[in-house]
């Protein structure tokens, strides 16, 4: 063991200490480049472990869309040292002991996590390390899991907002892989081979493409030692996965998507191109999204629901590793026409572009966001999930710095990004037309 300037930040041979921010300590595993984040907080005798892989639907292409998500299912089937035959699967080893275990997949990342009684943290570390490079990926499991994944796909197709959202992204992005839905296209889900899935696994599931985060109640020195031992058994990737270099071409005019399906509701959505999550404009864009459609006092709620034109509204500013979308979704009242709603939406955008937002609106947005920021440490899983999304966009320190940047946003900043990004020629408009509505 090497010495440390702080007794709360252990320094062990095999891992290099990088930095600490607000109680979160970053290390790098010397042998293979694994990033490690430790955030001890002895509030309850529970610890959370998450492995975030920097791979998602962004890393997929035609023929193997949905590979990340299908692999998520297969990687719960067991690994070399933890499997059904040995009687020590993740379910037997952790879930029967009261642990919460699961995984999620999205555009820029995949994560595997366990929230466990603290005495089972070493077992969770050993299990996650084993399936990082020793997962049992076999055709029998692909055949049994494929119908389950296909059923998830079909459930999404039966949801109005999900169906419209998928078409918006597919139309807004013609070159960049954000074009593909995270779950994949149905024909790829059904036909991808186990050999292709193994290649995808071998391309991306390596320590130097991952972050291990541990939060909650745990012994920092013992936990770091366990991570060095278990994850240190793996080598770096033989060849680092190629960075995504495809850039979306400049959009040269408004795009439109229309979906007509059996349904009892109608919807209009307008998406605008925005920059990557780490862009300096992102804090102001998040404020803009809140002011537009995040509460009952928001612009769109007052303009559309209070006037009985709509029954539901929301505006989402997607924070991704690459340039993304800000989307407003409106569920129409029974007698509201799509064209009328589109016009009203654009009028609300224009009001902010021309007149800006009020100091009261900004103050209210900051008050809400301050409460949201505080909630991001509300329990091991919430903290893990919050760190996970920042890791996905390329900078975990945003967990600390983004709240500070949000509080610095001014009304002029919000108007500036509205003028810059709420542009018709950079928009994609979607109509969902319910045939029985």
Image: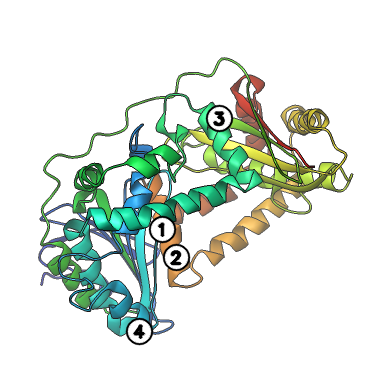
Q: Are marks 2 and 1 in contact (CB under 8 Å)?
A: yes
Q: Callout 3: helix, strand or loop?
A: strand
**Residue 207 at x, y = what percent?**
20, 54
Marks 4, 3: nearer the viewer: 4
Q: Which residue is mark 3?
A: 273
Residue drawn 47% across the image and 24% down it: 174
- Vertical placement of residue 361 versus 419, above or below: below
Q: Which residue is mark 4?
A: 97
The CA distance from mark 3 to mark 1 is 25 Å
- Closer to the N terminus: mark 2 or mark 3? 3
- Vertical placement of residue 409 versus 74, above or below: above
How would you rate the neighbour count of disc 3 (Cα within 10 Å): few for under 14, some for 14-19, many for 20 or more?
many
Q: Which residue is mark 1?
A: 387
How would you rate the neighbour count of disc 4 (Cα within 10 Å): few for under 14, some for 14-19, many for 20 or more?
few
Q: Which residue is mark 2?
A: 383
How would you rate the neighbour count of disc 2 (Cα within 10 Å): few for under 14, some for 14-19, many for 20 or more?
many
The CA distance from mark 2 to mark 1 is 6 Å
- Closer to the N terminus: mark 3 or mark 1? 3
- Vertical placement of residue 379 versus 191, above or below: below
Q: Quadrant of residue 212?
A: bottom left
The CA distance from mark 2 to mark 3 is 29 Å
* 425 sits to left or right of 59: right
């Amino acid at each position: 063991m090497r010495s440390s300037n702080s007794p709360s930040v252990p320094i062990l041979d095999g891992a290099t200490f990088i930095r600490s921010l607000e109680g979160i300590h970053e290390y790098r595993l010397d042998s293979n480049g694994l990033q490690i984040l430790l955030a001890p907080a002895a509030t309850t005798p529970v610890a959370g472990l998450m492995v975030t892989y920097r791979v998602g639907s962004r890393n997929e292409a035609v023929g193997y869309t949905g590979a990340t998500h299908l692999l998520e299912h297969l990687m719960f089937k067991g690994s070399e040292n933890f499997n059904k035959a040995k009687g020590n699967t993740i379910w037997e080893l952790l879930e029967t002991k009261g642990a919460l275990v699961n995984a999620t997949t999205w555009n820029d990342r995949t994560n595997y996590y366990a929230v466990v009684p603290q005495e089972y943290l070493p077992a969770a570390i050993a299990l996650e390390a084993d399936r990082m490079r020793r997962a049992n990926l076999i055709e029998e499991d692909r055949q049994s899991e494929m119908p389950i994944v296909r059923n998830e796909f079909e459930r999404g197709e039966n949801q109005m907002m999900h169906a419209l959202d998928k078409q918006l992204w597919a139309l807004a992005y013609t070159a960049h892989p954000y074009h593909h839905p995270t779950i994949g296209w149905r024909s790829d889900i059904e036909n991808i081979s186990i050999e292709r899935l193994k290649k995808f696994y071998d391309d991306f599931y390596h320590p130097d493409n991952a972050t291990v985060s541990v939060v909650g109640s745990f012994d920092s020195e013992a936990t770091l030692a366990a991570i060095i031992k278990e994850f240190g058994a793996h080598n770096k990737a033989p060849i680092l996965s190629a960075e995504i270099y495809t850039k979306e071409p400049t959009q040269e005019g408004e795009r439109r998507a229309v979906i007509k399906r059996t349904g009892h509701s109608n919807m209009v959505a307008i998406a605008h191109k925005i920059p990557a999550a780490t862009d300096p404009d992102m804090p102001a864009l998040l404020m803009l999204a809140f002011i537009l459609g995040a509460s009952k006092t928001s612009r769109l709620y007052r303009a559309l629901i209070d006037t009985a034109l709509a029954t539901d509204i929301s505006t989402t500013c997607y924070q991704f590793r690459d340039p993304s979308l800000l989307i407003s979704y409106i569920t129409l009242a029974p007698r509201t026409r799509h064209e009328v709603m589109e016009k009203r939406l654009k009028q609300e955008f224009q009001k902010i572009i021309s007149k800006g937002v009020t100091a009261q609106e900004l103050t209210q947005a900051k008050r809400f966001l301050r409460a949201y920021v505080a909630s991001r440490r509300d329990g091991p899983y919430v903290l893990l999930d919050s760190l996970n999304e920042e890791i996905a966009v390329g900078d975990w320190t945003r967990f600390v710095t983004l709240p500070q940047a949000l509080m610095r946003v001014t009304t002029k900043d919000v108007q500036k990004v509205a003028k810059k990004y709420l542009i018709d020629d950079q928009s994609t408009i979607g109509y969902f037309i319910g045939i029985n509505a």
